[in-house]
Image (cartoon, rainbow, N blue to C red):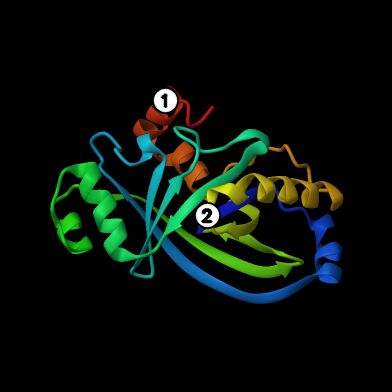
Amino acid sequence: MIEVEKKIVWKQEYEPMLQQQATFIKETQFEDVYLDNLEDYTLAMNNVWLRKRDNFFELKRGIDPKSEVNRANVDRYEEITEKTKIISILNKFFGTQCTTMEELESSKKIEPFATIQTRRKSYQWKEFSLDVDETNFGYQLAEIECQVDSKEKVEHATQHLLQFCQQNGIPPNQKVLGKLEKYILDNCPKLLKLLVKNGFLK
């Protein structure tokens, strides 16, 4: 699946609208551990992000080459959760022949570089999912997203998401740092320098 997502600054003034139009789903807490090769950040330099949440791995791969965002600051990533496919992709990046994630971790090809704890409130807002997140380092934001099953549907989904934001008084072109971007900005100077140098962050 491909995730089409818009990050926004969450404001208290949105709460009445949310209560009227959205359905509260659940509140959760979780810990994300992000991994990469700490020598050259191979994955990040290819706009690929590997995450472990509650011992389940997920790999996100940007669908726009060397760009974490497209116009209007909407994130568009292919989400991969099938472990065998994740291992296959990582083997290609690192030239390994590992058959398990444990082997890859033991090989030191991937190591943790960020750990983020999040408290999340999830809503269904019309045809979109909305997550309001607060991290253990005090950063808060919201993410509005939908998913499509092919790249051909991404452009339409992007336009639809931006129209939805505009109709509900949410600035459609505002650039908002994600949780991981904010963490990198504050805690990962080497990776930050590489991301800026290669045009992933400005």
| Residue at the spot 44% in from the left edge and 40% down from the top edge | 184
**Percent from the top left, x then y, of residue 124?**
70, 69
In this orientation, which residue lies closer to the viewer: 149 or 47?
A: 149
In this orientation, which residue lies closer to the viewer: 94 or 121?
A: 94
Observer able to see residue 111 = no
| Residue at the spot 26% in from the left edge and 34% down from the top edge | 40
| Residue at the spot 37% in from the left edge and 39% down from the top edge | 44
| Residue at the spot 63% in from the left edge and 41% down from the top edge | 176
Q: Residues within 10 Å of mark 2 (few under 14, many from 20)?
A: many
Could you tell whether 164 is left or right of 145 in the image?
right
Observer able to see residue 32 = yes
Compared with 198, 186 (above or below) is below
Dot 1 amino acid type:
Asn
- Numbered label attached to residue 57: none
What kind of element bears circle 1? loop
The residue where tag 1 is placed is 198
What kind of element bears circle 2? strand
The quadrant holding residue 148 is: bottom right
The residue where tag 2 is placed is 2
Q: CA distance from mark 2 to mark 1?
A: 24 Å
Which residue, as the protein is rendered here, is positioned at the far front? 152
**Percent from the top left, x then y, of residue 118?**
52, 62
Dot 2 amino acid type:
Ile
Compared with 118, 41 (above or below) is above
